Amino acid sequence: MPSRRRFLFLSGAALAAPALVAAPARAQGPLRIDVTQGVVEPIPFAIAPFQVETGGAEGAARDIAGLVAADLVGTGLFRQIPASAFISVPSSFGQAPNYPDWRAINAQALVTGAVGVQGGNLVVKFRLYDIFAGAELGEGLQFAGTQAGWRRMAHKVADAVYSRITGEGGYFDSRVVFVSQSGPKDARTHRLAVMDYDGANVQYLTDASTLLFAPRFSPRGDRVLYTSYESGQPAIYLIDVATVSRARVPTAPGEMTFSPRFAPDGRRIVYSVSTGGNTDIYATDLGSGSSSRLSSAPSIETAPSFSPDGSRLVFESDRSGTQQLYVMGAGGGEPQRISFGEGRYSTPVWSPRGDLIAFTKQHAGRFHIGVMRTNGSEERLLTASFLDEGPTWAPNGRVLMFTRETQGAQGAPSLYTVDVSGRNLRQVPGIGMAADPSWGPLLP
Amino acid sequence: MDDAVAAALAAASSAAASGQSGEGAQRADPGPPMTGAERDAFRVAVQQCWIVDPGSQAGRVTVTVAFELGRDAKVAGDIRLLTHNAESSSAADSAFASARRAILRCQGDGFPLPAEKYEQWRVVEMTFNPEAMTIR
């Protein structure tokens, strides 16, 4: 039985071997340390100048690197180390960085890239390095697109970098539909518009002939529901973003229909119907046109929003005497009240992550954007001002955009974003007067 | 003699003869245990480099990592993830990377550890628990 003998012999050797060396005086386990307090501050990162691989790509290389940096810094989670601090930079896209040089300036991550023009299209490549681990973080990626679409490629690079470092999906390559306003307060005009998440590339979907409000992107971002006074009374319309062709949506009958929102499958919508002073929530299948009533109460039920799995709805109701938030099944049924704080709650929106509900709260003469767990617990107010309202979630559930209106005769609306932590409040730049944002999905 | 056994004995004899410290061979008397102040100094040195993002899913993940320190009180070899309580692998990866960066960034010229107690801190298990920093 050679195998048996071998086992016994080896065991004996294993026992004997320690006797040949100095044995530890005492068995020693690991030192166990608990770290419970870190720091909340931006992660320092660097972007090396993007390499220019072909003639004619110099401007794009500079612009793309700049926009990647702007996206990351704009989250409030990253701090860019200026190029003036660099000790060395890789001489080619394929060359690994000299890690000690980047550690010396405390860069925790390094983005390198290269841009070229091939067949009239831009080709963008990038790599991400974890400086202190001394290794590439994920594999290099390459994007190609039209030269006019350089911003989208930059956003895609930034999304990939953000995702690899934070472990969460990005949101930079996305668009927002909103109501663009112009003119004095007593004669203001409204147009439906879409923009990149950062306020760039504003495109108008309608003219300024009609009062309209509360646009909502479809789950794929190809269509927009909105409410318009085009027919004299509020009614729901659907517009195709690419063709800007629009049509009134068949709904349950009523004096007014408003506050529409898509189901996650994009085939059904929910909305409010007001008749005889009573407002309830209805659903319509866009394919068949069939409608069903989801709430039935002698009060105002409105602003429905689906959970990401489509199984539940959160909405506002004044059935208790003041506006509060309620949750019910997507097919209707007895709702459960989830808001119990002081003040009035409205415009609830379920997070794409499914863990939080954002809302508008009015209390003591101030408006707030807040979030709470889906059972109403752990309410947190993220903002406070004369008028903040109508939150919408970034596709990764990390950031909220909303309308902030200033006070007085010259008061005007504009769009702001805030991190779900309550930090990093920023105004969306360059779009003028704007209200009612609805954040679309990440673009394909 | 069986070749494998001969190799094992040769390796053991070689280690004994060389008097190497650290990995698997000769180990010094670990001396008195680490004091609370010494452990605190180590913890503080790491936590000042531990960047937590309380709004993220990774910012709610507790990870325990293991690593060895050389006599220079700097990390020798890899930092390994032992356990985590994340619901997704991406959140676990991110939380682990954050912990690893904290250790590597703040080791500088070596952590403030008593040289005479090297055997007490040669092997470290460090738990990063952000629960106290979670947004509520």
Image: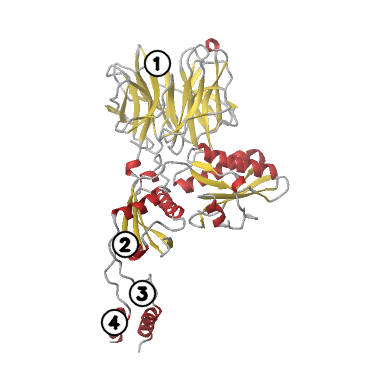
Q: Helix, strand, or loop for circle 4?
A: helix
Pick the residue in front: A83 or B31: B31
Look at the numbered disc 3 and give the secondary structure of its residue. Answer: loop
Residue type (three-letter) at the residue carrying disc 2: Pro
Horizontal side of A250 relative to A187 (left or right) equals: left
Mark 1 neighbour density, 10 Å: few (under 14) some (14–19) many (20 or more):
few
Identity, as a three-letter code, of the amino acid under mark 3: Ala
Q: Is residue A364 above or below residue B22?
A: above
The total of numbered circles placed on residues is: 4
What's the amino acid at mark 1? Gly
Which residue is under mark 1?
Answer: A254
Give x and y (percent) for residue B128.
35, 50
Q: Which marked residue is nearer to the observer: mark 4 or mark 1?
A: 4
Say which quarter of the image contains residue A433.
top right
> Can residue A180 be seen in the rendering of this structure?
yes
Q: Is residue A108 above or below residue A15?
A: above
Which residue is at 29% across, 82% downward? A16
Q: Position of residue A31 (x, y in %)?
A: 31, 59
Q: Which residue is mark 2?
A: A30
> Mark 1 to mark 2: distance in Å?
72 Å
Dot 2: element:
loop
Mark 1 or 2 closer to N-term?
2
Q: CA distance from mark 3 to mark 4?
A: 14 Å
Specify the subunit that label 4 lies on.
A
- Image location (x, y in percent) of residue A123: 64, 48
Q: Are discs 4 and 1 less than 8 Å apart at CB?
A: no
Question: What residue did someone put label 3 on?
Answer: B25
Residue carrying label 4: A16
The alpha-carbon separation of the residues under discs 2 and 4 comes to: 25 Å
